[in-house]
Each structure stands twice: as C-alpha cells, then as structure tokens.
Image: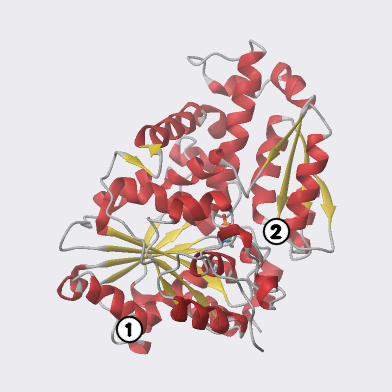
Amino acid sequence: MALDIQLSDDISNRQLAEQLIKDLSDRGEVVWLNDKLESVTPMSEVAGRKFLYIRAAQNRLLRFMPYIEKVFPETAARKGIIESELLEINEFEKAVKKINPELKGRVLLKDDAHLPIAGSVKARGGIYEVMVHAESLAMKAGLLHPTDNYSLLDSDECRALFAKHTIQVGSTGNLGLSIGIMSAALGFKVIVHMSADAKEWKKDLLRKNGVTVREYESDYSFAVEEGRKLSAQDPDSYFIDDENSEELFMGYSTAALRLKVQLFKAGIAVDEMHPLFVYLPCGVGGAPGGITYGLKQIFGDYVHCFFAEPVGAPCFTLGMASERKSDISVYDIGLDGSTIADGLAVGRPSSLVCDVMDTLVSGSYTVSESKLIEYMKLMHDSEGVFLEPSACAGIHALMLQGNGQFEEYIAERGLEDKMAGASHIVWATGGGLVPESVKAEMLSV
Ligand SMILES: *Cc1c(COP(=O)(O)O)cnc(C)c1O
C-alpha cells in the first residue's frame, strides 16, 4: 500500500521518516531516534516548566499523606506515600543476557504495577489530580487550611461537599481505576468513560467502588471526547483530561524525586561514567512524558528515556517521526489501534506531551504483540512478578541493545565505554490489580 502522509515541512531526514512510517503501517517493529534531543541543565527551567513545579506537586502529595494512610491502609507501611519498589531482577537479567549477550550494565525493575491503591502507574498522575481538585474545593469552602492534618478530609462535612461535585474521565481502564477509586473514597460522584479496549474486570471493580461506568464501542479518543463534552454541560463537574492535563503531568513527574532517593539508597550511581537508561510504556504519553520530564530535571544528560509502544497503536512514534504530533493518528496510516496492551491502546498522542518531549525524549520504539506475551511470561517465570502486557513493553529495549539504532545512539553519544557501568530501568506500569483468574488465563496463552 502506498501511503500518502503529509510530513511536516521542516523534517530533517524525509526518507528515513517515510520508511519508518511505512514500517509502522505494516505493524513492523521500529526504533525512532529523536534528532532534536537537547542538553538539559537539571533543576532549572526545562521546556517552559520550572523545577519548582515538581517540588510543589511533591509537597501536595506530602500534605495528603495522613489522609491516604487513613483511608488506604495498604499505604501505612510508607505512612501514606504512594510509591513502588525499585527491584533488582537478577534472574530475569541473566535470562535476558542469554538471549541478548550484547546487553551491558545492570537491569532494574521500577515496579509501578504494584503501586498501592490503583496497581498501575496511573496511581501517580490520576490520584494526584484528584487531590488538586479536592484540596481546592475544600479550601474554597473553608473546610481545609494548608496547615491542617489532611486526614480531616475523611469527614462527613467534606464528603457532603464532594458529593455535590462530579469528576469525569475517559480511560482505557487504568486511569479510570485510579481516578475512580480515589474520587469515590473522597465522596465525589464519578463517571468513567471507557473505551472498547477496557477489560471487564476493570469495569466491575469500578462499579463495586460506586463509580458510574459508561461504555463505548469506540476507541480511547472518542471516550475522552464524550467525557469532555458531558462534563462541560455540568458546572459542578470536573473533567480530568488525559490528553492535555498539566496536573496529571506534574503528578507523574514526582516519580523522579523518589527514584533518585531509591537509586542512592541502592548505591547505584548516575553520572558521566554511569548512564541511566529508562524504558517507559507509552499510551497517550502522559505517564512516560511526566516521568521523563522529572528524570531530565534530576539527572540531566545522564538519563536517556525511551518510550515503548505496541505495533498496533504506535501513536507517539508516529506523531514524533512525522512531526505532525497530535495532528496524526494511527488510523491515518491504516492501523485500527487494536492491541492486547490495553493500557497503551491509544490512536492519537497528547499534544502537550509531544511538545514537551520534543527535545527531552531520546527516542521510542514499537514491539510486537507476541513478544509482549513472551516477556510477560519470562518475567513471571524468572522473578515471580506478574505484569500486564502493556507493562512489558519496556523490556523490549533490552533485546535491542548492541544492535541497529540503539547501537547508533550509544555511538553518537560516545557512550560505548560507559555501558558496562550503565543501569537500565524497565518501568513496569501495571498489573497489580489483575484478578488471579484473569492472570492465570493470560499466562496460559
Ligand atoms: C496508561 C498506561 C500506560 C501509559 O500511560 P499514558 O499516559 O497513557 O502514556 C502504560 N502502561 C499502563 C499499564 C497503563 O495503564
């Protein structure tokens, strides 16, 4: 099939971009390198956003700790901090190095699949934005002051206030879970607009939490649009806009501050001789974008962030390689957007994220469906860690080390002799809430 895609005028290597888009349209595995990547000064103003913004988001999460600890007892061990482990996965690392002997350095797993409350990376951004809204409403009503112990939000008075308000969101599943569970706990009315990809068990779990679930036969962008429209008709409704939200983005970015401490405690250096590579599954781009933004603010040029997408829904790679960003969707190149990686089943990327990532993301790549399943099993068999298929997309980068564009990237940046000291973090983004019966089924395919 000849593709008739209009590329941006200022694209530097047109032939390369055209070939890459052709490969994407054939559901091929590709690697895209960002030739606009720029040097970053940590803790400065990056892409128009000050480091202070991350600190402010972090402070809000700290203010909410007593509330979170009280209402979600599973967070008690961390006193109400919503955080995941940074795991050494030696058995998995050995298994991967057998498959790809070119992989150098150590491999770590950032286990956001087991973040408390929502069991996915969405517990970072989604819960954070609900906090922003709840805090603002409670303060305006005079029920909350900055110096209060926020556990008072768990009171009849506050619940009565929140009950007059609705929170709405469009979701492929996990964002709905994080926002639904958090909003319902505070007492809000919640409506989650679910795309066709959303799994039944995710809808059931939400309904059990008192959340209204609206189902659509269409894709994620449609669910978001419907939610946005319906919310706009109700002055007491707040729409969490996954395609454009600064709040979600900053919520995700705080992961970097936490990761810095975890790396330090583990005695893992990130510096000139010890580059850090991070592989982040990407749907609309919010989670990987926010995390990348935070990591660049902390580690500057020593961190290299790559986004991972399924071959069925490579919206970010398409948007960036064509430089059309959110003006192009995977449907425009003949894909239908379907994938077993339901958390990544997105046809069009966030324009906000594409803009911010323009000079920050090192690149992105796509991975086939069958490999996602293979990696899911490999992780489960070697480490006993269950991840949903979406969460396994990061793993693919380990298999690409020492070859093709990854080798080119390393060479271009003079990193060859530093790779022995490198750390590779596979960001595992979901799977913690998957029911046992569904897990067993997924592992048996
Ligand atoms: C949502 C999600 C992602 C990606 O987040 P985006 O903000 O959509 O890019 C990755 N993995 C899982 C499991 C998710 O649910």
User: In the visual, does 255 lie left or right of 410?
Assistant: right
Q: CA distance from mark 2 to mark 1?
A: 34 Å
Q: Please tell me whether residue 185 is drawn above or below residue 209 in the rendered image.
A: above
Left or right position of 433 against 236: left
Query: Which residue is at a point 26% across and 74% down the rendered structure image?
Result: 410
Q: Quadrant of residue 427?
A: bottom left
Q: Residues within 10 Å of mark 1 (few under 14, many from 20)?
A: some
Where is the N terminus found, in terms of image quarters?
bottom right
Q: Is the C-beta of the residue carrying label 2 under 8 Å from the nearest atom of ligand 1? A: yes
Q: Is residue 19 left or right of residue 99?
A: right
Q: Quadrant of residue 241?
A: top right
* Rendered residue at 74%/31% (across/down): 188
The disc label shown at residue 97, or none:
1
Q: Earlier in the sequence, mark 2 or mark 1?
A: 1
Residue at x 77%, y 56% (from the top left corner): 222
Asked if residue 84 shows in the view, the reply is no
Question: Type of residue at label 1?
Answer: Lys
Q: Position of residue 33 (x, y in %)?
A: 39, 71
Q: Quadrant of the C terminus?
A: bottom right
Q: Residues within 10 Å of mark 2 (few under 14, many from 20)?
A: many
SS at mark 2 in the image:
loop
On residue 172, which mark appears?
A: 2
